[in-house]
Amino acid sequence: MLKFYEGIDIVKEIGGVKTAEAARTLLEERMSAEQYARIAGFEDPEIILKIANAAVMCEPDQIFINTGTEADKQFIRDMALQKGEEDILPMKGHTIHYDLKEEQGRIIDRTYYISNPGESVSSLANRMPRAEAIETVRKGMVGIMRGKTMVVGFYSRGPVGSPVSNPAIEMTSSAYVSHSAEILYRNAYNDFEREARKLGHFYTNIHSEGLNRPEDLPNARVFMDRAYRTTYAYNCTYAGNTLLLKKGNHRFSVDRSVYEKRGYELAEHMFITCMRGQNGRITGITGAAPSGCGKTTTAMAGDEFVGDDLAQMWIAEDGTIRSVNPECGIFGIVEDVNEEGDPVLMRCLRHPGTEVIWSNVLIDENGVPQWVGNGEPTPLKGRNFQGDWEKGMKDAKGKEIPISHPNARCTLASSALSNYSTLAEDPTGVETRVVTYSGRDSDTMPPVWTARNSDEGVVIGACIVSAATATEVGATGVKRAPWANAPFIPGPLGDYMDAQFKFFGSGQIGKGKRPVMAGLNYFLTHEARGGTGKKLLGEKRDVKVWLSWLERRAHDEVQAIETPIGFIPKYEDLKRLFKARIDKDYPRDLYDKQFSLYIDNIVKRIDLQLDAYGKEDNLPARLFEVLKVQREGLMALKETYGSIVTPAQLEAASGN
């Protein structure tokens, strides 16, 4: 069981500052009068102690307190250019940042949870005992900011005033990280202490890029100290490793939902979007997918966009499930972002008026960002994540170097999007009536299906399987991705799974308010359904139809065909929605290919889950019960109809 404030607080141990009075004295000596005045009014001793001890440990030449004013933001932008962490581009407000070519994703092999004796950590994660972590952090971080400025920012991970918006301090020597934080999070300098007092905690993040040399990268580390809700990262620059407000603090929020608010709150790796229904009705939808598997595209397919990556969810007093986005910006993968599939985002990326930090794309000879799959002519030369580039260049292994890295990104404020919802800044959140789970599945599940009850919905999330993406250094093949949140679940999966069953099955959810829980998959290929080639069986824009059907299903406006894995849509409903929502014909033969159940593939997937989860400790028995019932139902269908069962046969079997 996780115990908060257990063991030695590492930054306090290394910094050695024990009292708030000593911390104030030290900071007043080390800071300019102007900068010290910005924190002198903070009364919470823990805020002052964290900043003072980080300063002693890292030894920056200067400390800059970012209050979120336009002048402070411009100071950070200028510093990023002066340090060479970003370069200016011809389009106003656009800059380019390059990570080391060896660090183009999360360094999962060098990322650790700091653990106390007897404390359980997820079987999918790395752990390091506290005593060893103290010495590792001491070796890696003492003096790492000499000659640099430590920027201190105060943020709210969600709209200020929301019951699930966790306050967080970010301390870094990287102006690029601070610049990104200002776009992606709400600067809450004026509200920070009040919010921290209300929740009874705040998160702390300490980072330095060090000398930013390839030879230092093997010694890069990312640590999450769960007991003290403090992260440490050094010798790294990729935002997934350094912008600790993001996935580092998401892990702490997962802990909070599992060990402090079980059954009442969730912290999920989910987009939040809204679809319009009849008579102007707005329906909130959240959805989980592993990084690089279409969360941004799916979120943008909504009529009103709230967020594309993270969601804090809770059961409100009125019995509704509410969701807020901890972020207020997008750190989005750009590969395959184009006019056909992402017109709203492309307007921000290709036209003046939006501040954008590009990372690891190609900058052509005209200073224009270019990337794989943008639907535009490929330039002949430019500069990208590995240096100067020319078309046809090959790496040391003889493999052609693409114009952009598969994990190349764009960072921009959500408010720049034309479909950004005003609900995104509402501290009462978005009422959530649909929850989806998806991954890169080329051959098994249909495009959309819904669970028959909340327990089956939890199992859909537990059983996500996806092709590996470029978001993790060294990841290959096809792997399980439980709830698309597994890399960010600090504790045992059994604890997290129990929290999921308790939340979605809660008796506190009001009548008629329990969400539809569904699977999404728009990565089916032609070759998986009797054709040839790896081209998608459908288009990216079809997801708007799948979401529209789920919106109607949540309000009991469409019927469905019952199957052993849940409910699938009826053809006539989809045909109407394709025409109404995206003005596209939807032939019956395509429907049959997409929604036939390939029994052997699904059973193989179930057996994979039963075997893998069977090796975990203390999992809820309900998971195995649901999977075994589904397996038995599928095998009965196979005995009657064979290994491929069409929607018509499924309808006949269900009697509806």
Image (cartoon, rainbow, N blue to C red):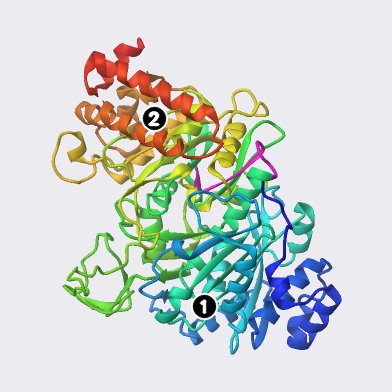
Location of residue 521 with respect to 468 vertically, above or below: above
Q: Which badge, 2 or 1, is on the more N-terminal residue?
A: 1
**Quarter containing the C terminus:** top left
- Residue 252, position in %: x, y? 62, 54
374 up-or-down from 543: above or below: below
User: Pointer 2: residues within 10 angstroms few (<14), some, or many (20+)?
Assistant: many
Q: Quadrant of residue 639?
A: top left
Q: Is residue 509 left or right of residue 631?
A: right
Q: Which quadrant holds residue 47?
A: bottom right
Q: Left or right: 397 with respect to 434?
A: left
Q: From where the camera sits, is residue 560 visible?
A: yes
Where residue 179 sits in the image (x, y, percent)?
54, 73
Res 35 label: none
Pick whichever, 589 or 385, lies toward us: 385
Depth order, front residue of 124/252: 124
Secondary structure found at label 1: loop
**In the picture provided, is 468 more to the left or to the right than 137?**
left
Q: Return the residue nearer the eye: 91 or 15.
A: 15
Q: Residue at x 30, y 43 (%)?
A: 523
User: Residue at the spot x=82%, y=68% of the render?
Assistant: 45
Q: Which mark is residue 209?
A: 1
Badge 2 amino acid? Trp
Provide the residue designation for mark 2. 449
Q: What SS does tag 2 mark? A: strand
Looking at numbered disc 1 in the image, what kind of residue is underneath it?
Glu
Res 537 quadrant in image: top left
**Residues drawn in magenta:** 260-273
Residue 160: x, y in percent? 69, 55
The answer to whether residue 94 is visible is no
